[in-house]
Image (tube, rainbow, N blue to C red):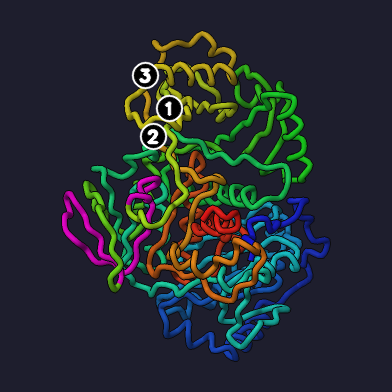
Amino acid sequence: MKPNTNKRPFADPQCLAASDDWRLAKTCAKQRLAELKTQYAASGFFDKVSRSQAAVQVFDGEFGSGLDFLLTWQWWNTVNSGGSLIYLAICEQPLTLDQLRQTQKQWPQLNNQSLALQAQYPGPIKGFYQLDFGEVKLILVQAPRAEAITQISAEFDVCLNQCTPNSQTQKLFATYLHPWQRPNKSMAQGSRVAVIGGGISGTATAYSLSRRGFDVTIIEQGQSLASGASGNRQGMLYAKLPDNATVAGQFHQQGLQHSMALLKRSLNSAHWRACGLLQLAKSPREQLQMQTVMAREYPSSWLQYFSLDDAQAIAKQPLAAGGLFFPASGWVSPAHWCLALFEHSRARLWSGSQVQALTQDDGWQVQVQGDHQGVHHFDAVVLANANDAKTLVPQHQLALKSIRGQVSYVQAQQGPDVVVCGEGYVTPAQSGVLAAGASYNLHTDDVGLSEQDHLDNLQRMADVLPQASNRDLSDVQGGRVGFRSVTPDYLPMVGQIADENTVIERFGKLRKDANYKFQQAMPYLHGLYINAGHGSKGLISAPLSAEILASQMANQALPVAQCVAWGLDPNRFLIRDLIRRKR
């Protein structure tokens, strides 16, 4: 029953070859729709779509040119009674975007759906991709079928194209999951959920939950959203890729792509830029590591390696070194994004309200001080308040620690045209000021600005931008202090929290046998969840984590591989401690 965090995600190479047979042969959409309707009718799919407001889920074993998805989407629009459609499809050899466009021209009656799909179509990189079309979601799993099928855990209403469901209920479970790793009872649609914390984690969680029909209240102790670490003027969208296939690498890669897609839908372009990001090779060892990353064969639309001359040309600044370039990355104003996610949700906000205690009692009693003082009942609670989550569940030893970080705002006539990262980072200038940071300090909780941290940030800036070496404190126009919340493995805690004492009692044999095969379920606490511990990568990890959590709570297909979901499980540290005989 060893934790499956060492279970390899999709193997290298990461770039998938396009199919040689890219389906230019004439395919009659009308005939195929008739075949699909017959299959849907036999599964009882019609009744659920026309009578229910819940989500319906379709599994497609071969996405191909997307015809079955487009037809299902178009037909679903005509019979839907207020629910949503989740369509998960495996794509072993994805078409290029040009191939997809040419193929789909033969179905003019599907033009609206085709154009929407083409606008979000991902590059040929292995992984899970959630394409969001409002009430319709497409989860595209780009990987060899044998790899993909082991990472899907969901219950589908109908299966198409070479799919052999495990039972009449058409469940597909990730094959390596033990019973205790499988999902617990979900929350009913319309359940009242308190999301504690109004930073990027909390607002993204509220956004994802409210879109699935939950009644969400954000409880924020500050007077406004993003009053904590999410309040910086500019933050970078950054994913450091490992030199082999890891859970963390797959999660951060997909998180960056998810955040960039979400920004396009949710935030005014004045508050973010997909300007690109340079990660400089600061030493021969880092240069070698970057070459190893490039050998994993990512497409150039996602990752490139630039020499010093090429890097300086795109940054329009002298640089200290060349390195990796992420064309689709950039920067965002976290505070504006938090506000936009809240405004796009149907959540309510209780600001100036501090949660004092949580009590499980036919749901959860939430004791609040401040503007909404009193004891309030909710069906579920999501802890999205970073390190403060530990104080609300002291009986659970949440593996979170706080790291102080300071960002410096530096006057600049002209900054780099792209985000530049080394030991620290420098953003493009906005209104004559760029952001440089950020300091890391585990040993203080001082909220005041530090001159020494400003000096350290100026040095970090000079290390990547040699022309900045003459900057001093007179150039600093202010700054901001925030406290990041991190875990021992630097992956966030996302999911349902288990009863700690029962876990220790039920799984105590792990102390003697790390591979003991239990049949018992994890003793989850009904209605208690967490989305915290994002560290410095919250802008790419928190929104995707919110989608994972909301999917778990709604019993919907996950937008990530099951090995990634388990790698984020908040109870993983307790299991590891048992194996290591620390508990």
Residue 124 placement (x, y as % from top left): 71, 53
Residue 582 placement (x, y as % from top left): 54, 53
Q: Nearer the viewer, residue 283 or 35?
A: 283
SS for tag 2?
Answer: strand
Q: Residue at x 53, y 40 (%)?
A: 237
Q: Earlier along the polypeptide chain: callout 3 or callout 1?
A: 1
Between marks 2 and 3, how big is the CA–CA gap? 17 Å
Residue denoted by label 2? 482
Q: Nearer the viewer, residue 564 or 357?
A: 357
Residue denoted by label 1? 407
SS for tag 1?
Answer: strand
Q: Quadrant of the N terminus?
A: bottom right
Q: For this view, does 381 lie left or right of residue 269?
A: left
Residue kind at label 3, given as amino acid type: Gln
- Please state the extent of the stretch shown in magenta in the rendering: 363-391
Q: Nearer the viewer, residue 554 or 299?
A: 554
Decide: marks 1, 2 in contact (CB < 8 A)? Answer: yes
Residue 397 placement (x, y as % from top left): 43, 53
